[in-house]
Image (cartoon, helix red, strand yellow):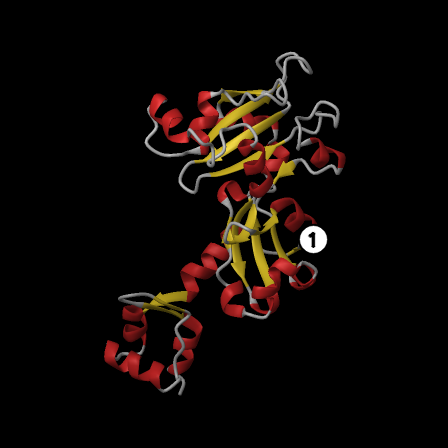
Amino acid sequence: MKAFAIKDDTVSKGRALAYLLYYEMPKMFFIEIPEQTTEWEAPLLLSSFVKKKMYTVDAYWSKKWVQQRVIPPDRQNLGEILRKNGMKEYDEFDLLMLAEGRCAQDECYIESVREDEVYEKMRERFSKKVKNAVPLAGQDVLLFFENDMVKKCSLKKTMAGKKEFFPICNNPGEFSRMKVLPGGHGICWGEALTISSEELYQMGEKVPLTPADFNIYIEHEVISTAEAAKRLNCTRQNIEDLIRRNKLHPVKTMLKSKLFLNSEVERRKWQ
């Protein structure tokens, strides 16, 4: 991750008005606004978030802020501009770096800062980022946060109230494809469908479980095909036969192996 302070010396002398975070592999931007930044100090587009007391800007609007500050991809002489700057292809991050985040709309610029500097200044906020998320039945999700809080969230009402979520509302297969956003900024189904970590933390109900408890459960309860065959004193072929006869149910199927719940395998020994 690369981190940058967003500054405007005409508004605040050297103080960061916001922080721009860039995750290189997925090429995603997120903006974090300090709570000290007022609506009048905040850069264009970000002031509306401050007004609503929303200090974490999602990937969509963070990217929009960046796009306002770089050459658009439909620029007529784009190829020539890229060649002159030694760029082989259009890249919003590289273009942002060339101009140091400056544009004609305001006096903002960006300045590189250490990643740990951002975390230090926003320690409490980052402690509520999502560490891990496990999709459950009924559009529920089990969430593990950086501060070791474990919460269960029911997303049924949240998703039903937003038409963009309709394609996955009644599709358990699609719902289970949920992933954690880079930096734990929330959960997502692709780039467009996201729910922020702030919203999840507020709506979630605390579960009397710690991440350590969950890890112990996984270590104790999830076993491989080889271990299942050993427990049942049979061959891998016997395991496959049990699966075909709906007598054993893998919780995960991989290319060369399957994972099973230890409790179900143990129950097979009783039958």
Number of marks drawn: 1
Please tell me which residue is depicted at 62% across the width and 54% down the height of the picture: 151
- Is 256 positioned to the left or the right of 165 in the image? left
Is any part of residue 199 visible from this angle?
Answer: yes
Residue 67, compared with residue 173, is above or below; it is above
- Is 208 positioned to the left or the right of 236 in the image? right
x and y, in percent, of residue 266 in the image: 40, 77
Query: Looking at the rendering, which quadrant does residue 223 occupy?
Result: bottom left
Of all residues, the one furthest to the front in this rendering is 76
Question: Few, some or many C-alpha atoms within 10 Å of disc 1 (few <14, some 14-19, many ≥20)?
Answer: some
Residue 212, compared with residue 172, is above or below; it is above
Is any part of residue 1 visible from this angle?
Answer: no
Q: Which residue is mark 1?
A: 203
Please tell me which residue is depicted at 53% across the width and 63% down the height of the picture: 175
For numbered disc 1, what is the local secondary structure?
A: helix
x and y, in percent, of residue 207 in the image: 63, 57
x and y, in percent, of residue 153 in the image: 64, 58
x and y, in percent, of residue 40 in the image: 75, 24
Towards the viewer: 95 or 152:
95
Amino acid type at mark 1 = Met
Which quarter shows the N terminus?
top left
Towards the viewer: 40 or 245:
40
Query: Looking at the rendering, which quadrant does residue 25 occupy?
Result: top left
Residue 210, compared with residue 86, is above or below; it is below
Towards the viewer: 202 or 234:
202
Which quarter shows the C terminus?
bottom left
- Is 163 positioned to the left or the right of 235 in the image? right
Towards the viewer: 120 or 29:
29
